[in-house]
Image: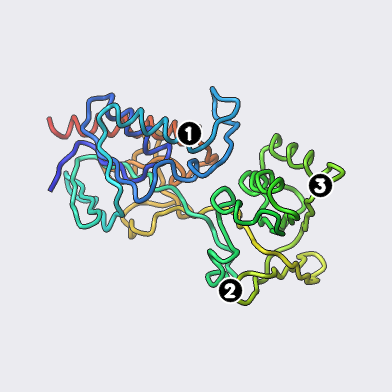
């Protein structure tokens, strides 16, 4: 069993920032991430709201954070967490069959894309239905696609996909968009161009997706008129929000609407257990707020570990 001062579960911006601050405070730190570091940021093609950069590629920003963190001596394990034991003075994390323990744990597992919730959704994942435009957009060059959603991610997907595809439908259940005004302005500017390939279907929800071997059409219902419409498309990109990765906590941590409830020190209801980033209950989920959470959690977790060891 390997022992650390602080163990961080999740390698997004909040987790990596927590690693940086905990290491700078003198703690021996392990970060466990199941895939590549950066989370949603790493698959974002253009970030224009992170202070200090007019524009930066998300993968580049993620790699910069990772290199800074590892240069400070933070250990990294790319593994899937099997279980968490948050009781006792030493908390335990088991990942890929190996158990690690530390007096302080930081939970920064982030959130995952919310699905459409329609009958055939799972059948077409990877066969025309995607939750990541940046990951899969290139496969739809010259084709007809739909983007579902009305927030920053959805409109950002439209801006990314429009130059690639031949036709793009934006489907949103309301008239107004929930995105930042600057993103809305960019979208409206692109849509208003004479040669625009963008059409909107507002006040509409997806009733189902259909096809034979691959997705071929999407069935819409207008929530005002209750009329249905069939759109022939080659692909659908879903961007309707995210759900927190809190399933493995199994009731041990106090939640608020499914998200982890923390105080101003990023402490949970269990001593020595902290949380940071999109997994926490808060008003705004952005890179800047994740960084703030990570800095606070990393600093306080290191202090807690130091006190617990006397």
Residue at numbered disc 1: 60
Residue at numbered disc 2: 120
Badge 1 element? helix
Residue at numbered disc 3: 196
Marks 1 and 2, how far apart at CA: 36 Å
Marks 1 and 3, how far apart at CA: 30 Å
Q: Quadrant of residue 38?
A: top left
Q: Earlier in the sequence, mark 3 or mark 2?
A: 2
Residue with the most extreme top position: 52
Badge 2 element? loop
Q: Quadrant of the C terminus?
A: top left
Q: Residues within 10 Å of mark 2 (few under 14, many from 20)?
A: some
Residue drawn at 26 percent across, 57 percent down = 83
Q: Is 226 or 118 nearer to us in this picture?
A: 118
Q: Earlier in the sequence, mark 1 or mark 3?
A: 1
Percent of width and height locating residue 262 = 39, 42
């Amino acid at each position: 069993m390997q022992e650390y001062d602080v163990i961080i579960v999740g390698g997004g911006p909040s987790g990596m920032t927590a690693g940086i601050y905990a290491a700078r405070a003198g703690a021996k730190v392990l970060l466990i991430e199941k895939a590549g570091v950066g989370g949603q940021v790493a698959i974002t093609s253009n970030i224009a709201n992170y202070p200090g950069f007019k524009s930066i590629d998300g993968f580049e920003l993620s790699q910069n954070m990772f290199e800074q963190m590892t240069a400070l001596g933070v250990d990294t394990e790319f593994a899937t967490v099997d279980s968490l034991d948050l009781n006792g003075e030493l908390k335990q994390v088991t990942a890929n069959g190996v158990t690690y323990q530390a007096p302080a744990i930081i939970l920064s597992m982030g959130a995952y894309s919310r699905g459409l919730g329609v009958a055939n959704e799972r059948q077409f994942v990877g066969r025309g239905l995607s939750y990541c435009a940046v990951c899969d957009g290139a496969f739809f060059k010259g084709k007809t696609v739909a983007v579902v959603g009305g927030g920053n991610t959805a409109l950002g997907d439209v801006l990314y996909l429009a130059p690639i595809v031949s036709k793009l439908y934006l489907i949103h259940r309301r008239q107004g968009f929930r995105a930042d005004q600057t993103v809305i302005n960019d979208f409206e500017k692109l849509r208003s161009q004479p040669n625009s390939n963008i059409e909107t279907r507002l006040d509409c929800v997806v009733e189902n997706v259909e096809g034979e071997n691959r997705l071929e059409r999407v069935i819409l219902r207008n929530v005002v008129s209750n009329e249905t419409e069939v759109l022939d498309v080659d692909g659908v990109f879903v961007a309707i929000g995210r759900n927190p990765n809190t399933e493995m906590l199994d009731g041990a941590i106090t939640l608020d609407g499914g998200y982890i409830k923390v105080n101003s020190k990023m402490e949970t209801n269990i001593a020595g257990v902290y949380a940071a980033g999109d997994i926490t209950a808060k008003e705004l989920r952005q890179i800047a707020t994740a960084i703030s959470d990570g800095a606070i959690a990393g600093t306080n977790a290191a202090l807690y570990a130091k006190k617990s060891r006397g």
